[in-house]
């Protein structure tokens, strides 16, 4: 099984298709580096160099740090970078220098903790058998005099997250897990995220329980990725992330739009596809309206029959029959979980569960995805209930166009 990183698993979570493009198919796509990326990498390299010097017993003066940044900047900056708004190279460079000056002034003489590693690559097994492996890159790993381990990460992003964002950040938990796994005797591990643009340090700790929970979740996610790899099924997941996806122009979820906008002449059927979608959307709207009216008329008929003691109403060519019957109402799993549980418990205790329960594909799918299911049982179940592809068409509103509502 491959070794997974947080970035890979996060890519899969955001969109399995993007994962397939990036890590399996690897199509050649024009890479447009952004000014933000270069800003991040040059600031990061300068700080790594700074702590490397400190490790060697040399505390560089601020002008020297600025010069190091300038050297990295010259090597990496080029005119093809994508910039946001009408900002230019000088603007980005100024931000980089400000990040470094603030950091320098805030932390000089850099003796708050001892550096154990810079760009520290850690790979660990998540289970005893060593099947599930995870790797992570820690910007700076350090140790305090009270034996607390610190995970430092340097961020140059434009947005300052909230403390709540940090508490739920899975990457932080995973890095914590990596450190605890590598040094099991360590009692305290804290994560320090430096938001350099704001000269802010946000800190968080994770309980062993949270780390265990994260380990379990990561293994589940790895199972999902592996299942995708085995079946070749990586569905698209359209979201706002598509706007920053390098594969949008070849993605099955967007290819038709590219045909319509850019390659219409080459693809004769592109327009026909558009007409079909428009027709389906129209039909669905009509159907929804009709269904609402059917419910309304049904209610009126029922009320009329109830009031007049009728069990059938006669139309011109049809009869509406009113059948009344009684069925047990199941307690809703979400609204009334206690009652639902009590009902199921009673059925089990009285040996009636088998009669009441039935297999459904959602439950079976969940069973098959359970990591602890023995492989031989999984294969037997798969043989009896083989996987089949199903296709469905749903219609959603396009966010990129405004459609005038018809009167
Ligand atoms: S464009 Fe969107 S749906 Fe397609 S691969 Fe990228 S993220 Fe996934």
Image: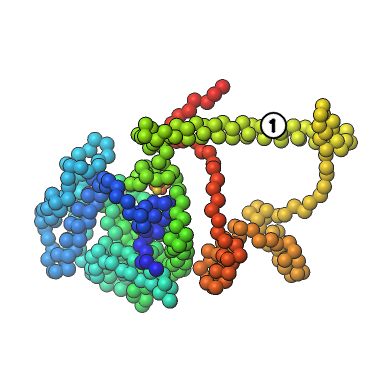
Residue 171 horizontal/vertical position (percent): 37, 60
Q: Which residue is mark 1?
A: 293
Q: Is residue 407 above or below residue 401?
A: above
Give the position of the N terminus as an image quadrant: bottom left
Looking at the rendered structure, the number of numbered marks drawn on it comes to 1
- CA neighbours of label 1 inside 10 A, class few (<14), some (14 to 19), many (20+): few
Question: Which residue is more in the foreground, 378 or 40?
Answer: 378
Q: Residue furthest right?
A: 309
Residue 225 horizontal/vertical position (percent): 44, 60
User: Of helix, strand and loop, which one carries label 1?
Assistant: helix
Quarter-wise, where is residue 9 in the image? bottom left
385 to the left or right of 246: right
Q: Is mark 1 within 8 Å of ligand 1?
A: no
Q: Is residue 400 visible?
A: no
Residue 180 horizontal/vertical position (percent): 37, 72
Q: Is residue 78 above or below residue 231?
A: above
Q: Is residue 47 visible?
A: yes
Give the position of the C terminus as an image quadrant: top right
Quarter-wise, where is residue 259 in the image? top left
Q: Residue at x 34, y 74 (%)?
A: 182
Residue 271 horizontal/vertical position (percent): 45, 32
Q: Residue at x 14, y 64 (%)?
A: 53
Q: Residue at x 83, y 39 (%)?
A: 322
172 to the left or right of 34: right
- Describe the colour scheme in one phrase: rainbow
1 to the left or right of 143: right
Question: Which residue is more in the foreground, 239 or 103?
Answer: 239
94 to the left or right of 281: left
Q: Residue at x 52, y 72 (%)?
A: 375
């Amino acid at each position: 099984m491959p070794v997974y990183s947080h970035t890979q698993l996060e890519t899969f979570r955001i969109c399995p298709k993007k994962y397939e493009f990036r890590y399996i198919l690897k199509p050649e796509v024009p890479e447009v580096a952004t000014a933000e990326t270069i800003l991040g990498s040059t600031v990061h390299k300068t700080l790594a160099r700074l702590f490397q010097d400190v490790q060697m017993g040399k505390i560089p003066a601020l002008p020297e740090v600025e010069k190091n940044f300038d050297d990295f900047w010259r090597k990496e900056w080029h005119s093809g970078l994508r910039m946001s708004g009408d900002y230019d190279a000088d603007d980005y460079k100024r931000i980089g220098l400000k990040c470094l000056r603030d950091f320098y002034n805030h932390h000089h003489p850099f003796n708050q903790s001892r550096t154990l590693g810079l760009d520290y690559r850690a790979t660990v097994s998540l289970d005893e058998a060593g099947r599930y492996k995870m790797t992570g890159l820690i910007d700076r790993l350090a140790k305090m005099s009270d034996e607390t381990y610190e995970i430092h990460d340097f961020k140059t992003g434009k947005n300052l997250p909230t403390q709540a964002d940090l508490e739920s950040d899975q990457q932080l938990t995973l890095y914590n897990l990596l450190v605890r796994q590598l040094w099991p005797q360590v009692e305290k591990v804290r994560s320090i995220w430096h938001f350099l643009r704001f000269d802010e340090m946000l800190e968080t700790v994770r309980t062993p329980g949270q780390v265990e929970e994260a380990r379990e979740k990561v293994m589940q996610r790895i199972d999902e990725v592996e299942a995708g790899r085995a079946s070749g099924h990586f569905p698209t997941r359209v979201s706002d992330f598509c706007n920053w996806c390098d594969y949008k122009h070849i993605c099955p979820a967007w290819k038709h739009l590219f045909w319509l906008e850019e390659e219409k002449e080459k693809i004769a059927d592109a327009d026909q596809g558009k007409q079909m979608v428009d027709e389906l959307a129209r039909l669905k709207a009509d159907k929804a309206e009709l269904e609402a009216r059917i419910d309304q008329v049904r209610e009126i008929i029922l009320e009329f029959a109830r009031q007049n003691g009728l069990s059938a109403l006669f139309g011109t060519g049809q009869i509406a029959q009113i059948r009344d019957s009684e069925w047990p109402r199941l307690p809703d799993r979400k609204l009334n979980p206690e009652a639902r549980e009590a009902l199921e418990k009673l059925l089990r205790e009285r040996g009636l569960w088998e009669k009441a329960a039935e297999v459904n594909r959602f439950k079976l799918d969940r069973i098959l995805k359970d990591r602890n299911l023995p492989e031989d049982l999984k294969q037997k179940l798969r043989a009896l209930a083989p996987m089949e592809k199903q296709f469905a068409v749903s219609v959603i509103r396009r966010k990129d166009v405004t459609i005038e509502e018809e009167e």
